[in-house]
Image (cartoon, rainbow, N blue to C red):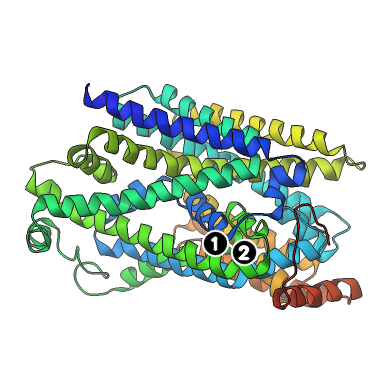
Amino acid sequence: MSDQIFIYIALGIYFAAMLLIGYIAFRRTSDHEDYMLGGRNLPPWVAALSAGASDMSGWLVMGLPGAIYLTGLIEAWIAIGLTIGAYLNWLLVAPRLRAYTEVSRNSITVPSFFENRLRDTSRLLRILSGVVILVFFTLYISAGMVAGGKFFVSSFNGDYVTGMLLIGGITLLYTLFGGFLGASFTDVVQGLMMVIALIVIPIAALIAVGGLDETGTLIAENASAGHLSFFGAGAVTGGTILAIVSALAWGLGYFGQPHIIVRFMALRSPQEAKSARRIGISWMVLSMFGAIISGLIGIAYMAANGIDLADPETVVLIMSKTLLHPFVAGLVLAAVLAAIMSTISSQLIVSSSALIEDLYKVVRKTPPPAKQLVLMGRLAVLTVAVIAILLAVTPNDTILELVSFAWAGFGAAFGPIILLSLFWRRLTNWGALAGMFVGAAMVFIWKAFDTGLYELLPAFILGMVTAVVVSLFTYKNDDEIQKEFTDTGTMLTVARPRTVGDTP
């Protein structure tokens, strides 16, 4: 049996497993809250691994190792920033958001939480939030499908459109029928595949090169100056500091990413956020460390074997193909696909919720029956996926660039409003609207001037300041809002049993 056959068998098993999980989730989905939020019944380990897998995409397995291989440890600052941001997100946002979204009229989406929390009778806040999510995530999903198509070209010398349609089609199927539960449980498998691949491959490469001493010698001989320094080559300059600050600023984006924080809302209880945090951060640290080490050891491995690596982002793929049995190498390739597909599936669900829960329900005054809502949610997933696929048929680098731009957009538009909604009683709907608009607008403006500073940081700060200032001018006391704020704090300290389908 040829090596390629083993790889195809491994990929076939992976695809079949994803579809099976989607079918099982389909059998467990009975109403709209199940489809969009898993009935708020997600165990902490599922929420943790799902949040991590839906966050990382192909950047973790390909982008980060490639950046370390090419440039050195200065590229690790973004991993440090993301890890700090993820930890603070789990620590500060997760338990309180889980409690507050249930207390505030059982909100099941981020835009509906904003509207309910701030009693926005104009509905502008919910509409603006839904439109932002829908537009950015459609492009985000398209970027993931482009990455999937290019992966098939580089890994199998296959056809771009065929690969893109295969990845898009299978992800669409298990998301379409399995909904939030399907996306979450496939994320668990995909997250485990990613972290195992990033542990096994550097260890296998280290052994193949000849141990730590030989690996260290080869890295020192073949790496560029400053490759092993967190500050790069030469003296630390203003440009170096600016680059490090920009990398660390990525962590701020976590507070506003809808496809990540929706996992917090789906936990069984606020108290379980603590154990979920420990699992999620452990997964993240192991994965990030494995990706960084893979990039460094890749330098030694390529030098020892005389391999001229044309594309640094394929360093993990090349090592897996040459070091491991073809079947195992196929599973590693599946792990790369897992990174891409887990992000797409999560974003499809959030896009669907924005279209149905946050836009359609605003237009239609009388809510349709629960079964009809589930059907419409699936149709919304299909619609967004088809648009994203059409955008991805012709590869466009500007779509891929929107991944980092969308991270900044969500972080600056939603991040300050999430934090203020959870921790400041005096936030108003007008303050939230102004802050969201200024945060999103500043991402565009700052990007246009190309200052070298990641646009998320200034946009986040200006969005936060705007929301606070406008709220101070427009604040009026509302006893019901104040009671919900207090009840949320009580819910965090007093655990209570909850069954699926409960409402406050």
Q: In the structure shown, which secondary structural element does the residue marked by tag 2 occupy?
A: helix
What whole-number distance in Å separates the C-alpha atoms at marks 2 and 1? 7 Å
Mark 1 lies on residue: 254
Q: Residue at x 79, y 52 (%)?
A: 501
Lower sequence index among marks 2 and 1:
1
Image location (x, y in percent) of residue 414? 64, 60
Image location (x, y in percent) of residue 184? 57, 47
Q: Is residue 135 visible?
A: no
- Crowd band around label 1 with a 10 angstrom C-alpha radius: few (<14), some (14–19), many (20+): many
Left or right? Give the position of 135 relative to 106. left
Q: In the structure shown, which secondary structural element does the residue marked by tag 1 occupy?
A: helix
Q: Is residue 495 above or below residue 110?
A: below
Task: State which quarter of the image contains the N terminus.
Answer: top left
Q: Residue at x 40, y 45 (%)?
A: 58
Nearer the observer, 234 or 492: 492
Q: Are marks 2 and 1 in contact (CB under 8 Å)?
A: yes
Mark 2 lies on residue: 415
Image location (x, y in percent) of residue 327? 28, 33
For the residue marked with disc 1, what is the amino acid? Tyr
Q: Can you tell which quarter of the image residue 412 is in?
A: bottom right
Nearer the observer, 195 or 348: 195
Q: Is residue 155 visible?
A: yes
